[in-house]
Image (tube, grey):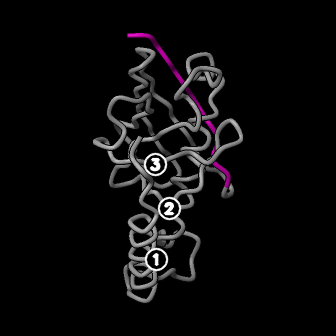
Amino acid sequence: MRPIRYGFWIAVTAIELLLLGACRTGDAGQRKDSKQSQVSVTEHASAVQAILQLVIDLPQLQPFLHPELPDRTPLVLIQTQEISPSLALKKFGHAVLIREMRAAQGKPFLHVTHLDVSGSKATVRLQYAVEGVSGEVELKEKDGVWSVEKARIWER
């Protein structure tokens, strides 16, 4: 088993925080006064976190996760451009580990292959290869709260 390199993740988190701070001080991340304003970087990260938590908690997905089996907890989620290790997700009483694909190889992992957040709608496509499962989830935001509109999980 490879030792966990906390220094690397601390450095990544520090860089992300610096970038978030820089974005918030620039025009691209500033909020306007109207309700129809641009979404700030932190609001986007919060939306992604809420969306992903709903996805990993889908009732249709639970029969395939098998937390009682070895290497299934903590749940491992593959890192992408939208999914960063700074997201705080929980499953089975543990923090979800967000890892690069190469670091997760050989172990069970959930892979979000598509994540699109457009305004008050989001679409997520996922694969859980160890169980031969794929899925698609449509979500909607209303009054700051995300909810699942439609979810479909199927075995390949």
**Left or right, 145 with reference to 7:** right
The quadrant of the picture occupied by the C terminus is: top left
In the displayed orientation, state which residue is furthest to the left: 102
User: CB of mark 1 within 8 Å of CB of mark 2?
Assistant: yes
| Residue 44 visible at all | yes
Is residue 62 highlighted in magenta?
no
Q: Which numbered disc flags the more N-terminal residue, 1 or 2? A: 1
Specify the segment rendered in magenta: 145-156
Q: Residues within 10 Å of mark 3 (few under 14, many from 20)?
A: many
Query: Eyeballing the image, is 89 above or below 127?
Result: below
Residue 137 at what x, y percent from top left? Answer: 50, 31
Query: Eyeballing the image, is 28 above or below 138?
Result: below
Q: Which numbered disc flags the more N-terminal residue, 1 or 3? A: 1
Query: Eyeballing the image, is 88 above or below 65?
Result: below
Residue 72 at what x, y percent from top left? Answer: 55, 28
Residue marked by disc 2: 86
Q: Hey, which quadrant is residue 11 in on the image?
A: bottom left
Query: What main secondary structure does the magenta stretch of the protein show?
Result: strand
- Looking at the rendered structure, the kind of residue marked 1 is Leu
SS for tag 3?
strand
| Label 1 to label 2: alpha-carbon separation | 9 Å
SS for tag 2?
loop
User: CB of mark 1 within 8 Å of CB of mark 3?
Assistant: no
Q: Residue at x 44, y 28 (%)?
A: 108
Residue marked by disc 1: 17
Q: Residue at x 46, y 57 (%)?
A: 85
Q: Which numbered disc flags the more N-terminal residue, 3 or 2? A: 2
Residue marked by disc 3: 98
